[in-house]
């Protein structure tokens, strides 16, 4: 592992053929919402932290007056059934801000998952903004490492072959680099309008992951955000139609120093 990127892991944690779910700041913050929600719902435990000099040169100011470095953090959930696959979650403050940094950080993640944890499959989560108007229930688009993965997830209502262009950042690179290391994977992208925080897109991906992995996830909190956002957008449309442009006070804007560049998936 290059000196500019390092991972600190807690001793004594062992895994059984874990799967990795990655959700970092990006388009609509879909990935970060999804993984943070799973982490909270399943009470995942933190066991490793990734630091890199490829993150922006800033630190996080905490409520207790302290500060901490920018990081990506690994959490785990042990399988309920004996012999079942454990779940590893990865989320964090930022993504690397240069092409060189993206390759270094994401390769460090993949190698750590394979060599230290014995990983077996990778999910990455991001957002995708299509040219067409978004349906009331956002679709989940997918791009996978191979035909077998595509065949497996077609029955899970993942839409393949409809996305165009490129996937920026970790959501694409981790799946591609994992493939080179012999680990299959899939990038799941919630259909989003590129809002700061798209809870509706996140809920679509969460529902799919819950079904695929047999996870019991309560999405009531996301439903509340979706309802508030929908109401705020309707108010905005009414103001614009009347020639008044003023952002509604109750629309949620989660922009914080912890968010990464919005153009990265």
Image: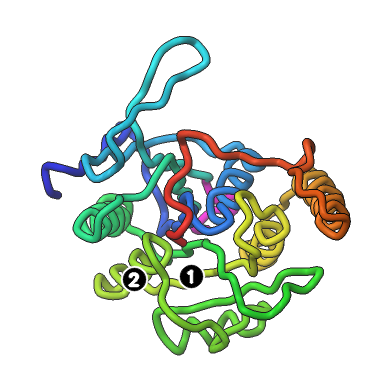
Q: Which residue is mark 2?
A: 183
The boundaries of the magenta stretch are 78-85
Q: Going by the image, does 214 lie left or right of 129?
A: right
Q: Which mark is residue 187?
A: 1
- Mark count: 2
Q: Nearer the viewer, residue 139 or 18?
A: 139
Q: Is residue 249 above or below residue 208?
A: above
The crowd level at tag 1 (other Cα within 10 Å; few <14, some 14-19, many 20+) is many
Q: Quadrant of residue 134?
A: bottom right
- Tell which residue pokes out farthest to the front in this image: 243
Q: Going by the image, does 214 lie left or right of 76?
A: right
Q: Quadrant of residue 74?
A: top left
Q: Nearer the viewer, residue 110 or 259?
A: 259
Q: Position of residue 83 (x, y in %)?
A: 50, 57
Q: Is residue 184 magenta?
A: no
Q: Main secondary structure of the magenta part?
A: loop
Q: Position of residue 160 (x, y in %)?
A: 56, 85
Q: Position of residue 97 (x, y in %)?
A: 30, 51
Q: Going by the image, does 128 lie left or right of 220?
A: left
Q: Secondary structure at mark 2?
A: loop
Please give the name of the residue rendered at 78% of the width and 69% of the height, measured from the top-left corner.
137
- Tell which residue pokes out farthest to the top in this image: 65
Q: Nearer the viewer, residue 187 or 233?
A: 233
Q: Quadrant of residue 208?
A: bottom right
Q: Secondary structure at mark 1?
A: strand
Q: Position of residue 122 (x, y in %)?
A: 43, 64
The crowd level at tag 2 (other Cα within 10 Å; few <14, some 14-19, many 20+) is some
Please give the name of the residue rendered at 81% of the width and 69% of the height, measured from the top-left corner.
136
Q: Nearer the viewer, mark 1 or mark 2?
A: 1
């Amino acid at each position: 592992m290059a000196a500019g990127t390092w991972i600190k892991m807690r001793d004594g944690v062992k895994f059984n053929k874990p799967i990795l779910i990655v959700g970092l700041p990006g388009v609509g913050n879909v990935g970060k919402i999804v993984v943070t929600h799973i982490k909270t719902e399943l009470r995942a435990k933190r066991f490793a932290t990734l630091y890199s000099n490829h993150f922006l040169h800033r630190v996080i100011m905490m409520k207790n007056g302290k500060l901490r470095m920018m990081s990506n953090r690994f959490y785990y959930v042990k399988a309920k059934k004996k012999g079942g696959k454990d779940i590893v979650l990865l989320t964090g403050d930022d993504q690397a801000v240069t092409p060189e940094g993206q390759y270094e950080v994401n390769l460090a993640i993949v190698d750590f998952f394979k060599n230290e944890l014995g990983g077996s499959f990778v999910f990455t989560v991001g957002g995708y903004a299509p040219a067409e108007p978004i349906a009331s229930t956002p679709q989940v688009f997918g791009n996978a490492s191979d035909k077998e993965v595509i065949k497996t997830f077609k029955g899970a209502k993942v839409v393949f072959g409809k996305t165009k262009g490129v996937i920026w950042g970790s959501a694409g690179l981790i799946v591609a680099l994992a493939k080179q290391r012999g680990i299959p994977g899939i990038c799941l992208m919630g259909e989003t309008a590129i809002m700061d925080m798209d809870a509706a897109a996140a809920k679509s991906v969460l529902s799919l992951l819950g079904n695929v992995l047999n996870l019991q996830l309560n999405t009531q909190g996301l439903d509340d955000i979706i309802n508030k956002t929908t109401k705020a957008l309707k108010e905005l449309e009414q103001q614009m139609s009347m020639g008044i442009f003023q952002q509604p006070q109750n629309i949620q804007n989660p922009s914080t120093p912890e968010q990464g560049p919005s153009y990265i998936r």
